[in-house]
Image (cartoon, rainbow, N blue to C red):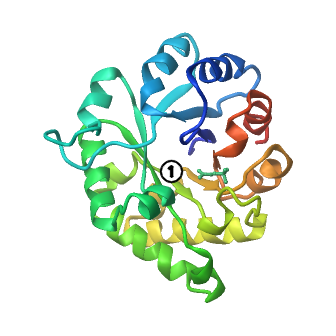
Amino acid sequence: MRSKIAAGNWKMNLDKTSAATLIEGLSLDGIGDTKVIVAVPSCYLSLALESTSDSRIIVAAQNAHHEQSGAYTGEISFQMLQSMGITHCLIGHSERRQYNGETNDIIKKKIDLCLEHGLTPIFCCGEPLEVRERELHKDYVLTQLKENILHLTTEEVSNIIIAYEPIWAIGTGVTATADQAQEMHAYLRSALANHYDSATASKISILYGGSVKPANAKELFANEDVDGGLVGGASLKADSFNAIMRSF
Ligand code: PGA
């Protein structure tokens, strides 16, 4: 059975005090086996690890560099994350593709390094608005899969989490409808089944991201192939993220 996952992505938000308050406000009581992940800014990784040491909350990094180590001022490596006990990292978020020039080639390198260091990549994919309007979204996302993760072995791909995040829905307040999300998630899963096999595809959690909030999470997560959410804005308040964790 694949995991149900509520993942928060804080992006570049919150000062130290509000970050600590937010983590303390998260409550996993009664959420069953749903996994809860928070992807925090790298300067708060230690703080987040310490304050979640007696809870099941998984602390994730938002990014790491695509080279092993070296003269890359300001960057952090997967090896550093591993040495700190970080187990998950976002890779391929559309904001990094857009603002930091991350190409499919760079993202592929990050996926490989992440797995090499024993971390779980939370691999993000999704199409921009103009691609959706031209009804090319399936081809677009399939190309991302092909160029970013389909080189992995069956064993490796079983260790990743996928987040489908249509760019037109991120931070815009416009959410994909439950049908649009299910259609794309089923499509992604069938692409994985075709390339690997259906047993492998059925084990991979595919999260939806893009304006998930307490008001729409239940409807989105009720779909067979939607295994949870990657949540930006609504993960910045404990109340709303606590409500999203309870939307399965
Ligand atoms: P949002 O962000 O929930 O604020 O739309 C989602 C994401 O970028 O992961």
Q: Is residue 141 above or below residue 221?
A: below
> Which of the image's four quarters has the N terminus?
top right
Mark 1 = which residue?
A: 203
Callout 1: SS: helix
Which amino acid is tagged 1? Lys
Q: Percent from the top left, x then y, of residue 37?
A: 56, 34
| Residue 106 picture quarter | bottom left
Q: Percent from the top left, x then y, of residue 92?
A: 42, 56
Residue at coordinates 71% horizontally, 71% vertically from top-left?
Answer: 180
Horizontal placement of 149 versus 54: left or right? left
What is the crowding at mark 1: few (fewer than 14 residues within 10 Å), some, or many (at least 20)?
Answer: some
State whether residue 51 appears in this view: yes
Does the beta carbon at disc 1 come under 8 Å from ligand 1?
Answer: no
Which residue in the rendered view is the most extreme toward the bottom?
Answer: 134
Horizontal placement of 71 versus 4: left or right? left
Residue at coordinates 70% horizontally, 22% vertically from top-left?
Answer: 26
State whether residue 150 appears in this view: no
Closer to the camera in the image, 171 or 6? 171
| Residue 131 picture quarter | bottom right
Residue at coordinates 61% horizontally, 17% vertically from top-left?
Answer: 17
Residue at coordinates 82% horizontally, 52% vertically from top-left?
Answer: 216
| Residue 233 picture quarter | top right
Horizontal placement of 23 versus 173: left or right? left
